[in-house]
Amino acid sequence: MTDLLQRVEQNIQNRRLLKRGQAILVAVSGGLDSMALLHALRKLSSRHRWRLTVAHFNHQLRGRSSDADEKLARQTAAAMRLPFVSGRANVKEFAKKSKLSVEMAARKLRHDYFTRAAKEHKIRIIALAHHADDQVELFFLRVLRGAGGEGLAGMKWRSPSPADSKMMLVRPLLDATKAELRGFAREGKI
């Protein structure tokens, strides 16, 4: 077992992120971070009897590249023999109508979709691939926006979904760096 995989398992256990035998919706964008998360949870799932469902949300922001990410997520789930669900929306159009930035519109639509998909499959936990570099980025973004002490706290390992407080978001990679995820992916040929 790799160092990163061991640390992810320890984080999950020590921080009580996931229970034995639990159903988990794994948010997979098709990018490095979420693919590493999916592979890590898959490797640990037999020992903990987790039931994984792969979920992808296509933001339709990058044309063929967005569709390629969805295809990769679908094919990976199929190769792992895991259930796959996907949703899509025109984020730019929604942002314009809602008077939101594209980033905030994408976030809202993504969280809404993952929550809906989790409910449909009777899943209460959504695993996200946020990592240590995301924490640093968020911290500086909040500093620039003038956030106070609580606003600078950063992402939590476990928190309620902004779309439905009964749904829990877990972030098992929160102390892993992007470089570590790259190494894990390279080692595992992900």
Image (spheres, helix red, strand yellow):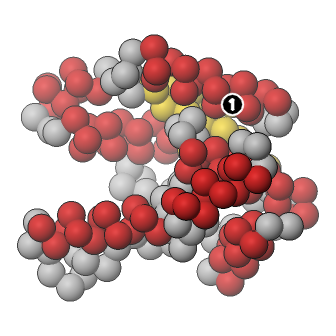
Query: Residue 188's x, y, as percent?
Result: 78, 49
Residue beneath disc 1: 84
Say which residue appears at 10% left-offset and 34% top-offset. 99
Residue at the (56%, 68%) spot, across then down:
176
Observer-nearest residue: 32 or 149? 32
In which quadrant of the rendered image does the N terminus lie?
Answer: bottom right
Say if residue 26 shows up in the picture.
Answer: no
Q: Is mark 1 on a helix, strand or loop?
A: strand
Q: Residue 165: percent from the left, percent from the top?
A: 42, 60
The residue lying furthest to the right in this view is 47
- Quarter occupied by residue 141: bottom left
For label 1, count other residues whose C-alpha is less than 10 Å away and answer few (under 14), some (14-19) or many (20+).
some
Of residues 60 and 162, the one drawn nearer to the viewer in this rendering: 60
In this rendering, position of residue 1 left or right of residue 126: right
The image quarter containing residue 128 is bottom right
| Residue 5, visible in the rendered structure | yes
Which corner quadrant holds the C terminus?
Answer: top right
- Residue 139 picture location, percent across and down: 28, 71
